[in-house]
Image (cartoon, coloured by chain):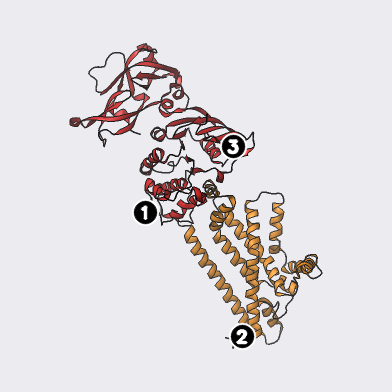
Chain colours: A red, B orange
Amino acid sequence: MTHVLDIAVRHRLGDFTLDASLTSDGRLTALFGSSGSGKTSLVNVIGGLIRPDSGHVRIDGETLVDTERGVFVPKHRRRIGYVFQEARLFPHLTVRQNLLFGHWFVPRAQRKPAELDKVLDLLGIGHLLRRRPGALSGGEKQRVAIGRALLAQPRLLLMDEPLAALDEARKAEILPHIERLRDEAGIPIVYVSHALAEVARLATTVAMVENGRVAACGPTAEILSRPDLAARPGAPEASTLLSAEVAGFEEAFGLARLTTPAGLLTIARGALRQGQRIKIRILASDVMLSLGQPAEISALNVLSGSIAEIGERSGVGGSTVHLLIACGEAKLAARLTAKSVALLGLAPGKLVHAVIKSVSVEMP
Amino acid sequence: MTDWLSPEEWTAVRLSLIVATTAMIASLPLGLGVGLLLARGRFWGKSLLDAIVHMPLILPPVVTGYLLLVGFGRRGPIGQFLYDWFGIVLSFRWTGAALACAVMGFPLMVRAIRLSIEAVDRKLESAAGTLGASPIWVFLTVTLPLCLPGIIAGMILCFAKAMGEFGATITFVSNIPGETQTLPSAIYTFTQVPGGDAGALRLTLISIAISVAALFLSELMARIVGRRINVE
């Protein structure tokens, strides 16, 4: 079976060893891990900037690297777009020339002439064409860099922490463009990030990278909620990702009702519209469990379910336990103290009520 | 104009400009190649190449001129080869003067080019690679334009050095009016004859004017190119 992405490589870089393998068919695969975990090295292997000591890289069934068969396709023949952390625009060229740089190297027969207008529209950079990179803001530079990579008509797009060098406002400016890219451009994306919020919002598939290895790889919601991954030292807190639809409003209190696979949730209305589809995220530590139906409490959201999985004790002195609760068609991640688990006598299959404050429901 | 310069003096000025321009243009491709090799290459004997290139800078010019005479003279191994196969004669011709000037200006040109290539951000080059540009295209479309100010500086330095070259030129191709008598040689000749002071002064002023003009030109070009590149 061919995968969009099929990688298994070993490579030594000084004291650091990259020994990673993963397969993915996601539209946007996030390589997620702390700084120095080897995410960028892995992306550089895919892009052809690093020649691995051994292993293979296959994209859509085409072999780009196979050390056993002596295959190594150089980076300029891979048709893999690369958006770097710093935009790396060519300072001696205008924005227009920058954008068309890669386009020019696409064989004439394969060039799509309407592509420039499409990309300008997708990224909202039409008004910048005559400027030089020096006259652009950080966010504009990064959007031009994305456009430049797209216009080379790649079969895969690599993005190495494209938002890391930007402030919050600039990030918010670019994120919607990356979402549109993921949903409309039809090019699979490999996205490197150490920011959980970005991964939760953008990724369809997550590969957790740790010390040069891929610790886990799978659908985003599953990976982010897994108790065993959250229990690892230095791992980000587990969270539940749910796709939700705005079902109605409580006008008097400024609230919105969401239908989710886990059940009905009520959150602050904000700028939501009727019928809008959104993604919501609930941190495991924001979920409280009760054995009886809670009454006379302030929290608006109570979801009933049964305990699906109880993780190992973790944290300093083994004080913490991560759990998964099966609520409706979804699984809710919760983080409790080991003492609470013992006091309530929690065990797989036990019926519980999960209590979630409205303010704890985030929209990444 | 000819009122205040004698025909011989005009010839010396014109010859100097031709010799210096030829030296500058002829050594450019090799200077680029060696600059690139020294900036990027990793090979055995790199420091040796570096030393050889810089040799004319530290050797007495007369020594360089004499070595050229030994090597490129009609009886010299290279000179004989050039004459036998291509009919090229360098000794005591203006082409020989250009060769001497090029050799003397070469280290300056290579140094400027090398430094500017080293200053080019390799990350931009790898970005160009991921966009489909082969190494040759990367060099032509990214590296070369980005080090253009350094190349211009190197060319002007080489030109200026060639305009002022005296020792190696006079040793290699002598001081023949109309053939190898460049500005410095002509000035030298004037100082050797009684009553030549006025001529020497006129040529000196011209020499100063050309040098200053070259300097201004290089500043201007570097600024035009630099404005396109360093807007950040």
Residue beneath disc 3: A65
Dot 1 and dot 2 residues touching (CB under 8 Å): no
Which label sits in the foreground, 3 or 1?
Answer: 3
Q: Is residue B154 above or below residue B136?
A: below
Q: Pick whichever, A13 or B124, lies toward us.
A: B124
* Upstream in sequence: badge 3 or badge 1: 3
Separation of marks 1 and 2 at Cα, in angstroms: 59 Å
Q: Pick whichever, A198 or B6, lies toward us.
A: A198
- Counting the numbered discs, the total is 3
Q: Is residue B147 left or right of residue A133?
A: right
Separation of marks 3 and 1 at Cα, in angstroms: 40 Å
Task: Please give the chain letter of the residue carrying mark 2.
Answer: B
The secondary structure type at the circle numbered 1 is helix
The picture places residue A220, in percent across and down from the top left corner, at: 42, 29
Q: Do we see residue B197 in this rendering? A: no
- Number of residues whose C-alpha sits closer than 10 Å to that of mark 3, classed few (under 14), some (14–19) or many (20 or more): many
Q: Pick whichever, A284 or A343, lies toward us.
A: A284
The secondary structure type at the circle numbered 2 is loop
Residue A127: mark in rendering: 1
Amino acid residing under circle 2: Leu
Residue beneath disc 2: B5
> Mark 1 and mark 2, same subunit?
no
Task: Please give the chain letter of the residue carrying mark 1.
Answer: A
Task: Please give the chain letter of the residue carrying mark 3.
Answer: A
Separation of marks 2 and 3 at Cα, in angstroms: 72 Å
Amino acid residing under circle 3: Val
Instruction: Give the quarter of the image for residue A75.
Output: top right
Residue at position x 51%, y 51% from top? A108
